[in-house]
Amino acid sequence: MKKYIALVLTAFVLLSLISGCAPKTTEDIANQDQAQAEASGLTIHKIGVATYDIQDAQVRMFKDYLDNYIKECFVDVTFLYSDSIAGGEELMEFLALCAENGAEGVMVFGSYDMEKEVEFCASHGMYYIRPSATSSDAEFNAVASNPYFVGEIGPGIEKEYQAAEDMTRSLAAEGKSYLILSGGACLGNEMHRLRTVAMLETLQEIYGTRFQQSSDVLALVSEPTTIEAGGLKLTICPGYLVQAECSAAASEAISSGAYTTVLAAIPVTDLMDALNSVEIECGVIDCFSEDNYFGFKKGKIAYVAGKYQSEIGPGFAALYNAITGNADAYRVNGKAFRLEQGFWTAADPSEYDSMYALACGATINAYNYEDLYSVVKSLTPEADFEAFRNLVESYSYDDCLARRSA
């Protein structure tokens, strides 16, 4: 297998030299990749990747893994990326683009209407997977029986809540004031809603107070909202930071100096200038990125519950199974799978340092080609769902370190 990959990659390099510089759009890049690969005699599988923000650190991390590792291990695959997607209409437009360009599957990180999205993909013969996400039970159950919905891998409801609760308990203390960045909670993002509810519930418990409105209601506010009760003061600042008005509101709140602590359900990369301008600490549920690495070094990031770049590897393997003729192999009683894969957690720079090396390794990945080959039936015919489940759920830092040390 390695020899075969090396030979095909050599052909790719020669073809790239002949073809000259790549076009600028991801659509053209994907088409060029496919043309080059087809020239080498391969059957090429195009996969769409729907991102909420192509410039986001976590998305860049996932993209780096797909482009610079997965494409070397699975040379018959090419990827078509979206630009930033901030709403359901934009996502549907991207899915239509994928269909027009012959995509056989799509990886969707941010969903707005799963039932509509999956139905569209099914009508165009495209398999749909959420490789790193958490949806509500109602959303999942509405599409679980659709044969083109492969499944979902993510922290799940309990782990999303627990991650935010643990972060809040780690940073909360008497005399502090809090800015909560709730991200897309008000826009239907279940992950962000769960995290925000957990922050609000945990702070009220710690301070021994209750707000007049429930945490479920407050998590969904669509404009900055300040609440004070029993010595607890906080402001909820909603929205995706890719939207200028949301980024400006969050930056202004941070720069005001009114808060000691930021609790973020979303990445804070776009807010680093504001964070560096005042004395403040930040806990974030995000990823083990270079941005957060330097944030820890500068003393602004105090806590990270994060994903890592190869965490989407099993999701890719499941989608690859589907588009290579093994769609039924990992269905559970005829339905899509739903598996949990939680976060790594760092509460100080030394913890982050040790995890960061494995999280962003160029050649040594937490989920490497041997892991993925072992659950792809076209490469390992004896692979079964139990092996796949075990691989997915062996996501912890210790689990991944043990695999690489074996």
Image: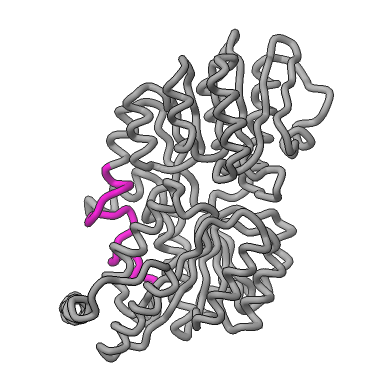
400 sits to left or right of 315:
left
Front one among 334 and 89: 89
Q: Residue at x 50, y 39 (%)?
A: 267
Front one among 94 and 308: 94
Residue 358 in magenta stretch: yes
Magenta-colored span:
357-375
Q: Residue at x 36, y 28 (%)?
A: 296
In the picture, the quarter occupied by the C terminus is bottom left
- Name the spot of residue 206 as percent of width and height, x first: 65, 18
Front one among 4 and 262: 262
Q: Residue at x 48, y 41 (%)?
A: 286
- Residue 339 lies, with reference to residue 190, above or below; the image says below
- Residue 357 lies, with reference to residue 30, above or below; the image says above
Looking at the picture, the colour scheme in use is one colour
Q: Residue at x 84, y 23 (%)?
A: 212
- Name the spot of residue 89 as percent of width and height, x first: 67, 63
- Residue 219 lies, with reference to residue 188, above or below; the image says above
186 sits to left or right of 48:
right
Q: Quadrant of residue 185?
A: top right
In the picture, the quarter occupied by the N terminus is bottom left
- Name the spot of residue 29 as percent of width and height, x first: 37, 72
- Residue extending farthest to the right is 212
- Name the spot of residue 304 as percent of width and height, x first: 44, 34
Q: Quadrant of residue 293?
A: top left
356 sits to left or right of 305:
left
Q: In this figure, what is the number of numbered marks?
A: 0
Front one among 276 and 142: 276
Residue 377 in magenta stretch: no
